């Protein structure tokens, strides 16, 4: 399936980056806003911190091409993230 490469994050305007979904989700390639300055991502971590100040998890804006580009929030560690791991994985074709 062709994945649109020019999808943009509605929150910060960054181009969404294709990456493999976490293996346990069964997703294929998903599109994710990987901008650490994205207001959606930054705001999400504040929300998480209200419940768990120790948490380094935030939510990134993402779309699932397999599902008509429906948007969802992808849980991501703000520090060393599985997103980075996914990126490395998707580079090895
Ligand atoms: Zn964004």
Image (cartoon, rainbow, N blue to C red):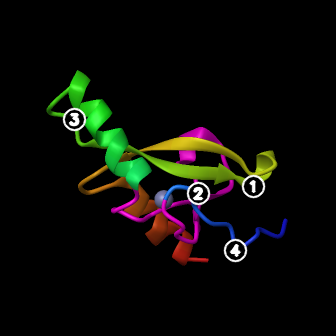
Q: Is mark 2 within 8 Å of ligand 1?
A: yes
Residue hosting label 3: 55
For marks 2 and 1, the one nearer the N-term is: 2
Q: Position of residue 59 (x, y in %)?
A: 42, 43
| C-alpha separation, residue under disc 2 versus residue under disc 4 | 12 Å
Q: Residues within 10 Å of mark 4 (few under 14, many from 20)?
A: few
Residue hosting label 4: 6
Quadrant of the frame with the N terminus:
bottom right
x 15%, y 31%: residue? 53
Residue range in magenta is: 12-38
Q: Is mark 1 within 8 Å of ligand 1?
A: no
| C-alpha separation, residue under disc 4 versus residue under disc 1 | 12 Å
Does dot 2 land on a helix, a strand or a loop? loop
Q: Is mark 4 in CB contact (under 8 Å) with mark 3?
A: no
Q: Is mark 3 in CB contact (under 8 Å) with mark 1?
A: no
For marks 4 and 3, the one nearer the N-term is: 4
Closer to the eye: label 2 or 1: 2
Figure quadrant of residue 55 = top left
Q: Position of residue 17 (x, y in %)?
A: 56, 68
x 81%, y 49%: residue? 68
Figure quadrant of residue 4 = bottom right
For marks 2 and 3, the one nearer the N-term is: 2
Q: Residue furthest top?
A: 51
Does dot 1 land on a helix, a strand or a loop? helix
Q: Is mark 2 in CB contact (under 8 Å) with mark 4?
A: no
Which one is in front, 51 or 2? 51
x 83%, y 70%: residue? 2
Residue hosting label 1: 65
Numbered mark located on residue 10 in the image: 2
Q: Residue furthest right?
A: 1
| C-alpha separation, residue under disc 2 versus residue under disc 3 | 26 Å
């Amino acid at each position: 399936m062709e994945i649109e490469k020019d999808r943009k994050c509605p929150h910060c305007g960054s181009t969404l980056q294709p990456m493999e979904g976490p293996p346990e989700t069964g997703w294929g390639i998903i599109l994710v806003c990987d901008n650490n300055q994205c207001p959606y991502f930054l705001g999400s971590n504040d929300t998480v911190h209200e419940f768990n100040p120790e948490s380094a998890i935030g939510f990134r804006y993402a779309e699932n091409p397999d599902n008509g580009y429906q948007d969802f929030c992808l849980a991501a560690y703000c520090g060393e993230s599985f997103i980075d791991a996914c990126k490395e994985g998707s580079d090895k074709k």
